[in-house]
Image (cartoon, rainbow, N blue to C red):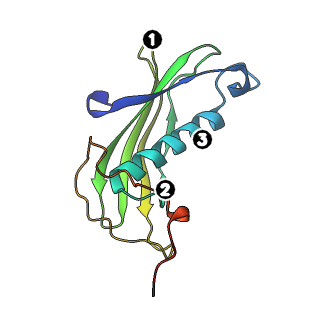
Amino acid sequence: MNNGDITFHTRKWVRPEDLNANGTLFGGSLLRWIDEEAAIYAIVQLGNGMAVTKYMSEINFVSSAQQGDLIEMGLTATHFGRTSLTMRAEVRNMFTRQSILTIEKIVFVNLGVDGLPAPHGYTEITYDRDRVPSQHLDRMPPPQH
């Protein structure tokens, strides 16, 4: 994967509770971190706190991480659909830059107040915070009929 277009924002420290029986980073912990990071990315790009994971393609575990390693996660939008956002992810060792995991396709769907897919109106990545929702949907007043 060419990571030239991916920005690595989030870093994690591999701690004892993140390890599997082999003493390396547990894949489930890593996938939880990636899904959370992707959700935050989708919320910022779509300007909506109600974006949900729809699909993850093949997950390629390239190498592992050990206790004490610092890893960094990167995402980039690859396609804006009418109600969805597709992105690509990579996780790498912060010091060696060695790839740990790649996911070519993660799809999030933008939801409306009714919980159904809703058009978001965006076609390109933002690097500003202009789309960050000012509040989460569950804290918003109910819609007026």
Q: Secondary structure at mark 1?
A: loop
Mark number, residue 117: none
The disc, 2 or 3, on the residue closer to the chain's N-terminal end is 3
Q: Which residue is mark 3?
A: 32
* Vertical relation: 100 (above or below) 138: above
Q: Amino acid at mark 3?
A: Arg
Indicate the position of residue 87 as horizontal and vertical percent values. Answer: 37, 47
Q: Amino acid at mark 1?
A: Phe
42 relative position to 114: left or right: left
Kindly report the distance in space between the C-alpha atoms of the residues bearing marks 2 and 3: 14 Å
Q: Secondary structure at mark 2?
A: strand
What residue is drawn where x is 30% and y is 62%?
81
Q: Quadrant of residue 27?
A: top right
Look at discs 2 and 1 and give the one toward the viewer.
1
Kindly report the distance in space between the C-alpha atoms of the residues bearing marks 3 and 1: 22 Å
Q: Which residue is mark 1?
A: 95
Q: Which residue is mark 2?
A: 55
Q: Amino acid at mark 2?
A: Tyr
